[in-house]
Structures are given as structure tokens and as C-alpha cells.
Amino acid sequence: MALDLSFKQLIDAAEDGAATIGQPTCIAIDRIDEDPDQPRRSFDEQKLEELAESVRQHGVLQPIVLRQATEEGRYVIVVGARRYSAAKRAGLRDIPAFIHAVGSADRYVQMIENIQRDDLDAPEIAAFVADRLEQGDNQSDISRKLGKPRDWVSR
């Protein structure tokens, strides 16, 4: 069962309506760091190279979402790690991005993005669910926030 939501709706759903608004800005790629807690642990090399080729030809068509890092002038990826990696491979110096207003990443935003864009493998999903349960969420909360049936979460 795939989610049928736009990028904006994904952020709205995960943050209860607190989506980033306005125009994207261009951020230098060398000022962006990957989130070490990103749910996706592996990227399909062939798909990433195909995306990089698309970026070479057409640019980045959908901005990524960043948050301020603790270090001044640096940003951390909230949503768009594959687009960021593809842009780096394509040789881009900057990338269009929305700057997320809150200080820490919403793990649900990242998970929804990954589910929507390309299915995660079972161990990545299980690790996310286990982490959310450890953080105090219950299976019903996780199910509702991800837009997945409760039995999908329990599996």
C-alpha cells in the first residue's frame, strides 16, 4: 500500500500542519551534512546514478528540506538525502532547499519520505519502529503517523 501524498502533504501529515512555506533557497552543497539518524541506511547504487544523470540533465526538480546544524552556517538534511547525494555526484555546487524551522529532525518526516519515494528494506523499517517504541510511541501512534495499517507496524 503506497501513500498517495504530495511532498507538502507528507510534511503536513508528519508535523500536524507545520510545513515549511515560501520559496526554496539555494544552499552550497559543502555546507550540508547528512543526518546520521536518517532511517535509510543503504542506497541502490544504480538508482542513485540514474538520479544523478537526471540531475545533470534537468537539475534538482524538488527542493530538499534542511535544518540548522549546531555549527554556525551548516545544515543537516531532514528530507532529500538521495537528491543531495545525486546532486553531489552530478557535480552541483548548490541545491535548492527549504530551511526547516524547528531545531531537530522529525523522524516521521524522514520515514514517510523514504516510504513514499522508495520502499525501505525490512531491517530499516524495523529499526525505525523499534526506535519509536523506545521513545515512547505506541504501535497505534506509529501507524497513524505513517499512514500504514497497525498490522503493518506490528510486523
Image (tube, rainbow, N blue to C red):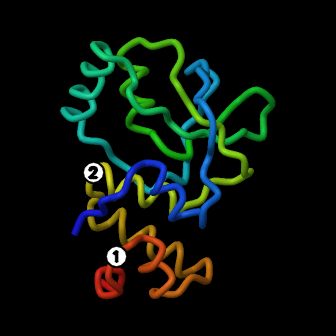
**Residue 106 quadrant:** bottom right
Location of mark 1 (residue): 148
Q: Nearer the viewer, mark 1 or mark 2?
A: 1
If the image is split into quadrants, where does the C terminus sit?
Answer: bottom left
**Cβ atoms at labels 1 and 2 below 8 Å apart:** no
- Residue 118 is labelled as 2
For the view shown, which residue lies furthest in the front direction?
22
Q: Residues within 10 Å of mark 1 (few under 14, many from 20)?
A: some
**Residue 3 quadrant:** bottom left
Question: Which residue lies at the image location 54% right of the left edge and 17% below the top edge?
Answer: 94
Question: Which amino acid type is marked by label 2?
Answer: Asp
Question: Which amino acid type is marked by label 1?
Answer: Lys
Cα separation, mark 1 vs mark 2, equals: 15 Å
If the image is split into quadrants, where does the N terminus sit?
Answer: bottom left
- Measured from the top left, where is residue 25 in percent x and y? 61, 24
Q: Is residue 143 above or below residue 128?
A: below
Is 35 on the left-hand or right-hand side of 10? right
Mark with earlier residue (1, 2)? 2
Q: Is residue 70 above or below residue 96?
A: below
Q: Secondary structure at mark 2?
A: loop
- Measured from the top left, where is residue 143 in percent x and y? 42, 80
- Measured from the top left, where is residue 56 in percent x and y? 31, 14
Q: Nearer the viewer, residue 1 or 132?
A: 1
Q: Secondary structure at mark 1?
A: loop
Question: Which residue lies at the image location 45% right of the left edge and 39% below the top edge?
Answer: 81
Q: Is residue 139 above or below residue 148?
A: below
Is 133 on the left-hand or right-hand side of 143? right
Q: Nearer the viewer, residue 35 or 77?
A: 77
Question: Which residue lies at the image location 51% right of the left edge and 64% below the top edge?
Answer: 13
